[in-house]
Image (cartoon, rainbow, N blue to C red):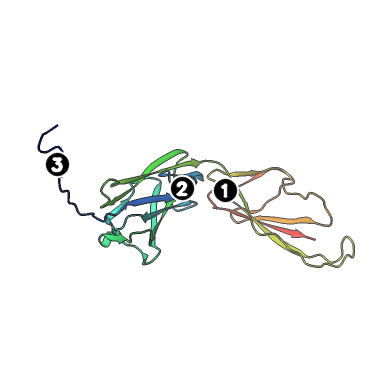
């Protein structure tokens, strides 16, 4: 109700700034929840069996995104960064200095993370990404996993005997080998007479040899295969 300035015009000026915008997608659905669960993995000591997962970093903004020197980090523990690979530039080494991710989702950084537990039970950590994103730095991706303390039988490839003359028991016989091992942290017990066939059809176990203790006789008692892939059983089969 101002009698001489009922309408006032105010000039507004500004400059639109291009900005980066980081986004992280992990290899376990839902991919955008900033949470990567490795599930159960054998707690067989550092350097043995481990699980892998990936975190993909993209830049949905218009300006290039700068990741700081050593800007992808993990506190010490059961998880470790194995590699960082750019879809356009190859291997990324942040220990040598900062690096950029192109804007407009034109480039993807794939961060490979290892889970290598040394003890049984639940484990967690956070992958920390430090960048020049104005509102999402540092970015935290929660890492989860469970160390398993149990045996885990692994069996070699299928044995193929090929064609064999059907000349009855005691005639010609083809042989093949099957290798058994134990990827788990605990010894694997194979029961007495624990190697057999669903239907005989001319197959038989000729011998079982342990890489550590020599001949294995399951007809008299059970026996064990050492954990952490420390022992193999070579089973010779006849057909």
Q: Position of residue 156 (x, y in %)?
A: 64, 57
Give 140 or 79, whichever is nearer the viewer: 140
User: Residue lying farthest front?
Assistant: 3
Residue 95 falls in which quadrant of the image?
bottom left
Q: Which mark is residue 31?
A: 2
Mark 1 or mark 3: name the one nearer the start of the chain: 3
Q: Mark 1 touching mark 3, by CB under 8 A?
A: no
Q: Position of residue 116 (x, y in %)?
A: 44, 48
Which residue is label 3 attached to? 8
Q: Of the residues tagged 2 and 1, which is closer to the observer? A: 2
Q: Is residue 200 left or right of residue 50?
A: right
- Give the structural element (helix, strand or loop) at label 2: loop
Mark 2 or mark 1: name the one nearer the start of the chain: 2
Disc 3/disc 2 C-alpha distance (Å): 51 Å
Image quadrant holding the C terminus, namely bottom right
Q: Is residue 50 shown above or below 177? A: above
Give 84 or 118, whichever is nearer the viewer: 84
Q: Is residue 2 left or right of residue 50?
A: left
Q: Residue at the location (46% across, 47% down)?
A: 31
Q: Residue at the location (14% across, 41% down)?
A: 8
User: Residue lying farthest top?
Assistant: 1
Q: Which mark is residue 226?
A: 1
Q: Please tell me how crowded label 3 is: few (under 14), some (14-19), or many (20+) other residues with Cα within 10 Å.
A: few
Q: Of the residues tagged 1 and 3, which is closer to the observer? A: 3
Give 32 or 222, whichever is nearer the viewer: 32
């Amino acid at each position: 109700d101002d009698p001489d300035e009922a309408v006032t015009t105010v000039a507004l000026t500004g400059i639109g700034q291009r900005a980066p915008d980081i986004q992280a997608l992990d290899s376990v659905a839902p991919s955008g929840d900033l949470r990567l669960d490795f599930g159960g993995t054998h707690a067989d000591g550092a350097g043995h069996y481990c699980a892998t997962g990936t975190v993909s970093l993209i830049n949905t903004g218009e300006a290039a995104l700068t990741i700081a020197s050593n800007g992808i980090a993990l506190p010490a523990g059961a998880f470790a960064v194995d590699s960082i690979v750019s879809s356009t530039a190859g291997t990324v080494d942040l220990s040598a200095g900062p690096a950029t991710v192109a804007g407009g989702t034109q480039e993807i950084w794939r961060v490979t993370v290892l889970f290598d537990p040394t003890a049984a039970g639940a484990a967690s950590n956070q992958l920390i990404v430090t960048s020049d994103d104005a509102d999402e730095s540092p970015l935290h991706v929660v890492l989860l996993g469970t160390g398993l303390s149990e045996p885990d039988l692994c069996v070699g490839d299928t044995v193929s005997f090929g064609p064999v003359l059907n000349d009855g028991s005691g005639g010609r016989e083809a042989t093949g080998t099957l290798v058994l091992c134990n990827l788990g942290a605990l010894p694997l017990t194979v029961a007495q007479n624990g190697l057999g066939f669903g239907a005989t059809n001319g197959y038989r176990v000729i011998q079982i040899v342990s890489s550590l203790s020599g001949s294995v006789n399951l007809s008299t008692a059970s026996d064990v295969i050492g954990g952490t892939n420390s022992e193999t059983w070579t089973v010779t089969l006849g057909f």
